[in-house]
Image (cartoon, rainbow, N blue to C red):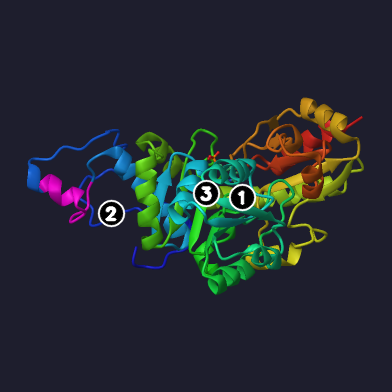
Amino acid sequence: MNHRYRLATVALHADASSPEEAGSPLAPPIVQSSTFAFPGLPELDRVMSGEVGGYYYSREGNPNAQALAAVVAALEGHPCGVACASGMAALAATVLALAREGDHVVSAREVYGGTRTLLGEELGRLGIGTSFVPGTDADRFEAAVNSHTRLIVCETLSNPTLRLAPIPDLVEVARRRKLHLVLDNTFATPVLLQSASLGVTLTLHSATKYLAGHDDVTAGVVTGTAEQLSRIGRLVARLGASLDPFAAWLALRGLRTLPLRVERQCANAMGLAQWLAGHPRVARVHYPGLPEHPQHHLAARLFGGRFGGMLSLELAGGEAAVDRMIRRLRLVRLAPSLGGVNTTVSHPLRSSHRYLPAEELEALGISGALLRVSVGIESLADLVEDFEQALAE
Ligand code: PLP
């Protein structure tokens, strides 16, 4: 797109090919083909050598995956993107593309559990070491950098206590120390934070969450510069971590309404957080939109006055009270994912963080009393009523 459109328009039009042929479909067709045919060798050669654009084998690239990646890249403000089979595939391909045996990574310690085990265990086994540091302090990241460090990994908003990475400061550290900064923007989405506008050059998403948004597809996307993405894209194909055409089609269909959904989720989350904060059985609410959140001002500045659809709460009655409330909720279901149109809750201690040692759980502020809420697009009044009846005597 040559014209600079706004976010909601980009989500709808960034993959449009023009000029249109008469009678072309408005919705993109699903190209459910694992391979592509050619009239003869010169034509095949031109596509395989990259001399002309085109497809020859779906693992190496297919129109639906490419369209999804192009729209996410446009939303993040990056020139290129690559779609992958999952968020974990996106992370694995990114780190493996940028680091080799003997290299070192500095990561926020609050990152998603799968990210933590991939970096700390699997990549550690391959000789890529990771130091985990408290994720809200850029100085702690810089202090952990050594002569082997190649990249910094962080998440815009941490799970489950919703702390912000100091992104502008980390961009500076990465620039000064000549490192790649990899930002997982899954929780915030480009609706809250467009990475390129802050100087972030490499961003990834679990598109399984907000981008696709309907809890019906597993996908990931990496966006960044052409140079970085050509290496990452090659590795995605070589690892066989490419996205299936139908999954890509579903994710793109969901992505069309991302700005609408997230705006509604932000409004619902703010309303629910405020209501929960005033409830006598709720000991604490973690939501960047509440003035008592320790990084409320940073969130207001970085996210343009919206604060996201994720919150967490601690019940005064501990784990037993949490289980009681979960069982009594009628609309809101217990499910270990997030970012979909339905409001769901998850219990970090019993699911995502269950394998962490006690001292780390304490450092991360995770106890049995903590419940994470992924706020959906229902009517706020119905959500409040559901929590109200579930918390009642
Ligand atoms: N990043 C974050 C912040 C996540 O929450 C998740 C999954 O929950 C992932 C990455 C991994 O994504 P996927 O499950 O699509 O592999």
**Looking at the image, do the residues carrying marks 2 and 3 touch, with CB atoms under 8 Å apart?**
no
The secondary element bearing badge 3 is classed as strand
Image point (71%, 52%), residue name: 162
Mark toward the start of the polypeptide (2 vs 3): 2
Callout in the foreground (2, 3): 3
Please state which amino acid type lies under the numbered disc 1: Phe
Please state which amino acid type lies under the numbered disc 3: His
* Residue span colored magenta: 43-54
Look at mark 1 in the image and give the residue it sits on.
187
Mark toward the start of the polypeptide (1 vs 2): 2
Mark toward the start of the polypeptide (3 vs 1): 1
Viewed as shown, does residue 274 lie left or right of 259? right
Image point (47%, 63%), residue name: 6
- Ligand 1 has an atom within 8 Å of the beta carbon of the residue at disc 1: yes
- Ligand 1 has an atom within 8 Å of the beta carbon of the residue at disc 3: yes
| Magenta-span inclusion, residue 49 | yes
Q: Which of the image's four quarters has the N terminus?
A: bottom left
Task: Measuring from the top left, give residue 329's x and y in whole percent.
Answer: 76, 29
Q: Is residue 27 visible?
A: no
Callout in the foreground (1, 2): 1
How many numbered discs sit on the rendered protein?
Answer: 3
Q: Is residue 293 above or below residue 233?
A: below
Crowdedness near tag 3: few (<14), some (14–19) or many (≥20) residues, C-alpha within 10 Å: many
- Residue 205 circle label: 3
Look at mark 2 in the image and give the residue it sits on.
17
Image point (75%, 52%), residue name: 287
